[in-house]
Image (cartoon, grey):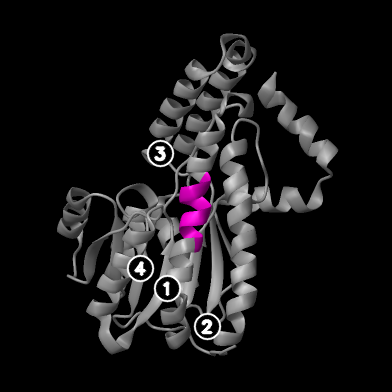
Amino acid sequence: MIRRSKPTPPAGRAVVLTGASSGLGRECALQLERRGFRVFAGVRKAEDGEKLRADASCKRLRPVLLDVTDEESVRAARAEVLDAVGERGVWGLVNNAGTCVSAPLECVPPERLLQQLHTNVVGAFAVTQAFAPDLRRTHGRVVNVSSGLGALAMPYLGAYATGQFAKEGLSDAFRRELRPFGVSVSVVRPGAIATPIWDKVRETGEDLLEGAPREVADLYRSSFARFLRMNEERAQASGTRPEDFARAVFRALTAARPRARYHVGPDARAAAALSRLLPDAVLDRAFAKVTV
């Protein structure tokens, strides 16, 4: 493992970031570019890439068409990045692409769970595997974006937490396997942040409830509606901002000794502490208030 005593300056180093079209990924791509990285921002639609390029300030941001669930798209994106960076190589990979399915687990069709796992977990795995040879050459960095739900599973966010727990395990294994080659792997866990994702979470949840058998959906309808309102209010009241998330990613990419996990926001830190300190029975009683 390569040991550094000083932070690594961005200095035009190349970073690939997935899921840069909107929300936290978009803010992160723009901030990393402003702070000196050369950013290859993964987007699924060309028009999203052009909007992102227009907002970039230093001409160090390049949109790349990248669908993490499509192996050919991943290969093509890697080839495009390597052709652009030449001998300097790729310094960092930020696996940010993800979706959020929020609904009672009884109302989540197995194919929707598989779809989410394909994006959030298998996609991160595929992109990391593709770029691993390039990161070994530069002794670079991998940053996997999880959430507070990577430590603590809440009712009605079980499908999402399943993917986040899996991504945490994937990150631990990659960190230990790539360590001998000088590659660090960090997890960034953001808490609730006000972004457009909450509108999508509500829409998805309501659609899944409508698609479930009536006798099952009716069991959860009122408590799930309260949960959605609570989640949105918590995000709107949160003092954590997308810029805070982007700063944590920047630290993971530049720290002399990057940490295994970075928590963004007091709720993410609290979730990690509670999962370690409280017995399951105590947590279950606390969460029972959500489901009644």
Q: CA distance from mark 4 to mark 1?
A: 9 Å
Q: Out of 104 and 274, give the one closest to the viewer.
A: 104
Check contact, mark 4 vs mark 1: CB within 8 A.
yes
The range drawn in magenta is 117-125
What's the mark number on residue 131?
1
Answer with mark 3 or mark 2, whichever residue precedes in sequence: 3
Q: Out of 287 and 96, give the one closest to the viewer.
A: 96
Quick one: SS at disc 3? helix
Q: Of the residues tagged 4 and 1, which is closer to the observer? A: 1
Q: Mark 4 highlights which residue? A: 16
Q: Quadrant of the N terminus?
A: bottom right
Q: Of the residues tagged 2 and 1, which is closer to the observer? A: 1
Dominant secondary structure, magenta: helix
Q: Residue at x 29, y 69 (%)?
A: 39
Q: Out of 107 and 184, give the one closest to the viewer.
A: 107
What's the mark number on residue 197?
3
Q: Of the residues tagged 2 and 4, which is closer to the observer? A: 4
Question: Is any part of residue 137 visible from this angle?
Answer: yes
Check contact, mark 4 vs mark 3: CB within 8 A.
no
Q: Of the residues tagged 4 and 3, which is closer to the observer? A: 4
Q: Residues within 10 Å of mark 4 (few under 14, many from 20)?
A: many
Q: Mark 2 highlights which residue? A: 256
Is residue 59 depicted above or below 154 in this figure?
Answer: below
Q: Residue at x 31, y 58 (%)?
A: 66
Quick one: SS at disc 1? helix
Answer with mark 4 or mark 3, whichever residue precedes in sequence: 4
Q: As shown in the figure, which amino acid type bears the numbered disc 2?
A: Ala
Q: CA distance from mark 2 to mark 1?
A: 22 Å
Quick one: SS at disc 2? loop
Q: As shown in the figure, which amino acid type bears the numbered disc 4?
A: Val
Quick one: SS at disc 4? strand
